[in-house]
Image (cartoon, grey):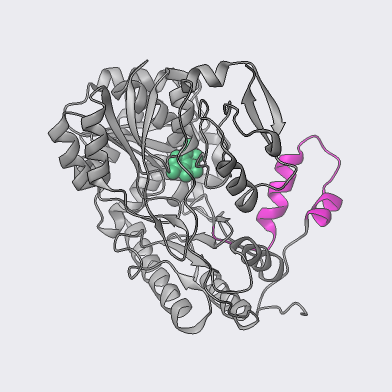
Amino acid sequence: MPRRKLPGQRPPLTHRQINRLLPFTNAPLFHALQLLATGDSARFHMPGHKGRPVFNTFAEVFSIDFTETYGTGNLYLGDGPIRDAEVAAARYFGAVDCFFLTGGSTQGILSMLAAAVGEGGSVLLDRGCHQSVCHACALLDITPYFIDAPLLEPFGIAGALPVDEAGRQLAAHPEIRAVLLTSPTYYGVRRNIEAFSVLCRAHGKKLLVDAAHGAHFTALGLPTPVLEGADLAVLSIHKTLPCMGQGAVLLCGEGIDRRALREQTVLFGTSSPSYPIMASIDLARAYMEGPGRAAYCRDAESCAALRQMLAQHTCFTPLSVENHAMLDPCRLTVCTAGTDITGRRLADMLWSEFGVACEMADSRNAVFILTGSDTGGTLLRLRRALRRLSARRHETPPPAPAAPFPPAERVMPVRQAWFAEHTAVPLARATGQICARPVTPYPPGVPLLWPGEKITGAHIALLREKWYNEDGDIRVVIR
Ligand SMILES: Cc1ncc(COP(=O)(O)O)c(C=O)c1O
């Protein structure tokens, strides 16, 4: 099929072309990024600013790259203009307090687990949690228990988390100190935080929410997790708002020892927190209180229109409120099940033929992050590209329901397995062994197997079928 160009579109550079163009200097990353930035592609992935900062000051980013000196404030002492910016952000997000993070939501997840669960404690986790939660368990010797969400068809992605199952686990394991949920998920599924909050209060547990993908909710009139009853929540400002990479915030509800919490952020943060990153968190919040709000509302409308167009005029299936009532209004998940291509193939074709880069793709879906920084032009390009690709596809019988990843038996603490002597073995020889490192397709960065879990033949079969080929290997504990 010949490549068709959309109006005004230059094809994106291939890796080989980029390499040929790179001058021989010692700044290869900078040059590679510069080439990509000056090329012509429609970016539907993080960071939320899409390479189009809404503030001109960012052209002079180095001029504001400061340190703790006269007038700049100190993040870890919580003073100066940094503190003022945190207070403004707390007000905007409806939180009792807010701490800036320059190590992404990862730093916030480590900090909130250290504060609410502590060394050697136990936690009840959404099995679809990000790998940083697993890292926290290894560092802090935390014992994880899990709740699994039934899969949403035909997407094969985690749907609503069963609150009653969480209640059963809390009753069975009274040593659990906190429950951690991911909401929204990478695919845009929101969880019923209010119901979990009621449950946690009834059992005297803390509720923690990884809302890394939900920093734009306030602009759309959706509550942040702390307004729905969570005790602590992290938001990656950089993922969906016009903020530099790694900018995130940790939000507190009532009754949190804030001094102790800030100390935990110090434990997991650099001693040189970036002022440009902190300033961009501050600017992103200010923007969302001004013109950003309308820009994101328009974006949510564009996302709804794209979902409708996909449902009516293509062979692809958009994740929409008909599939799951509670969704991120700005996340577009496009399912290719029932057609002759995979989500990954769709993503590759969008990039190679139309210069449209999605955020991630898996065997059944391609995921697009829409933000207030999208333009009419990039949205039109996405729309036309999806329609054109659909016109060339053939429908196939709907696939069998996606197989859930089989539950795993914990035979060793996460920390012990992580720090044990370990080796890589081919998948074919891993049955019966103990997993030493999280097995994590990235993105979405959700571990399928955790350190300390026993690897079964069923795990291997599914890993091979869906994620890794015959030659893949897996790290196992040496016994
Ligand atoms: C659900 C979820 N939580 C946490 C993180 C970590 O966020 P950050 O990259 O801001 O550290 C990610 C990263 O992709 C994520 O998808």
The quarter of the image holding the N terminus is: bottom right
Residue 410: image quadrant is top left
Q: Is residue 109 above or below residue 238?
A: above
Left or right: 133 with respect to 387? left
The quarter of the image holding the C terminus is: top right
- Residue in view at x 47 percent, y 60 percent: 373
Could you say where residue 326 lies in the image, as x and y percent from the top left? 30, 59
Could you tell me what secondary structure mostly forms the magenta stretch?
helix
Residue 140 belongs to the span the image colors magenta: no
Residue 127: image quadrant is top left
Could you say where residue 85 lies in the image, as x and y percent from the top left? 32, 35
Q: Nearer the viewer, residue 197 or 350?
A: 197
- Residue in view at x 27 percent, y 18 percent: 259
- Answer yes or no: is residue 433 visible: yes
Q: Nearer the viewer, residue 187 or 436?
A: 436
Left or right: 160 with respect to 470? left
Q: Is residue 368 above or below residue 263?
A: below
Q: Is residue 345 above or below residue 140?
A: below
Residue 355: image quadrant is bottom right
Q: Nearer the viewer, residue 180 or 303?
A: 180
Could you say where residue 287 lies in the image, as x and y percent from the top left? 36, 52
- Residue in view at x 45 percent, y 56 percent: 157
Residues drawn in magenta:
15-44
Left or right: 419 with respect to 323? right
Could you say where residue 147 lies in the image, as x and y percent from the top left? 34, 41
Q: Is residue 322 above or below residue 13?
A: below
Q: Residue furthest left?
A: 202
- Answer yes or no: is residue 77 visible: no
Residue 20 belongs to the span the image colors magenta: yes
Q: Nearer the viewer, residue 155 or 300?
A: 155
